Image (tube, helix red, strand yellow):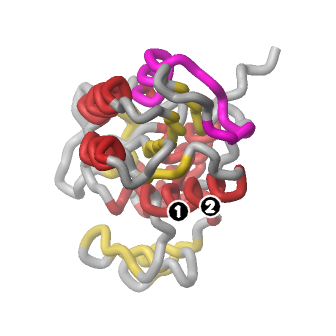
Amino acid sequence: MNPPVKHAVLRLHFSSAQAPCLDSNSQPVATDEALQRLQTGDAWAALAASGEDVGALTNWLMRLRQRVGGRLPGVIVFLPDCASPGAMAALKAGADALLPLDSPPALIRIQLARLRERITPQPEGGLRLDPGLELDSQTRSLRIGDQHLPLPTQQFHLLWTLGARPGEVLSTQELRLAMDVPARARADTVHTAVARLRRHLRPHALDQRVQTVHGAGYRWAAAAEPTDDSATT
């Protein structure tokens, strides 16, 4: 039996809204379920429709930001009037963007693409991991001293995302987004990519720098950071 499909974008409808947003590619869910799934990384964005009374929406946004620390996920809010005081309240509470309630699907897709780019910018230029250790986006390779290690695109994006935030635990959903993994891909796609990246790094004694933090995600460890009981390689 195949695992259930994970939807990357959720759709919420608060009671004050006269109608939901018009995006059929997202999954409609209740507010509490959305809060849980966004927190656990089962989705990376939410489309939240509200009416002029944004009290329930702003409370939900604040609960979400408290739980996930403000980085992920992204939230696009749909309102009857995007210039109203309620719209400003939604932005202050943590909404990433505002759109009219009757926005067409094409406009919603464009805004989601912009939001995704803000959340996971594409690699550009070089990224220094350590002295003598640098990623090059032009060649998609890792420079190790005088050597250059080419990496497949997906693994390069994985290492870039981890290396850009050293020591920080990144969820599998964040890494799926960075690697452009489709929502319908297998649930173990990130785990498989991590294993392949480690195999590429092992001849250079760098594989243990990619650490698994059980129940949370993965991280790129600093050079002098030992592997502790909460992380395994």
Q: Position of residue 12 (x, y in %)?
A: 54, 28
Residue closest to the far right: 1
Residue nearest the viewer, comparing 51 with 209: 51
Tell me if I can see residue 72 in this picture. yes
Residue nearest the viewer, comparing 55 with 185: 55
The residue range painted magenta reads 21-39
Tell me the quadrant of the picture where the C terminus can be found.
top left
Q: Position of residue 106 (x, y in %)?
A: 71, 57
Tell me if I can see residue 71 in this picture. no
Say which element carries label 2. helix
Up-down: is 27 above or below 111? above
Residue depicted at 62% across the width and 52% down the height: 108
Q: Which residue is mark 1?
A: 114
Q: Disc 2 residue type?
A: Ile
Kindly check if marks 1 and 2 are in contact, taking CB atoms under 8 A apart as contact: yes
Q: Which residue is mark 2?
A: 110
Say which element carries label 1. helix
**Disc 1/disc 2 C-alpha distance (Å):** 6 Å
Up-down: is 162 above or below 142? above
Residue nearest the viewer, comparing 191 with 161: 161
Q: Position of residue 112 (x, y in %)?
A: 57, 54
Drawn side of residue 85 relative to residue 78, left or right: left
Tell me the quadrant of the picture where the N terminus can be found.
top right
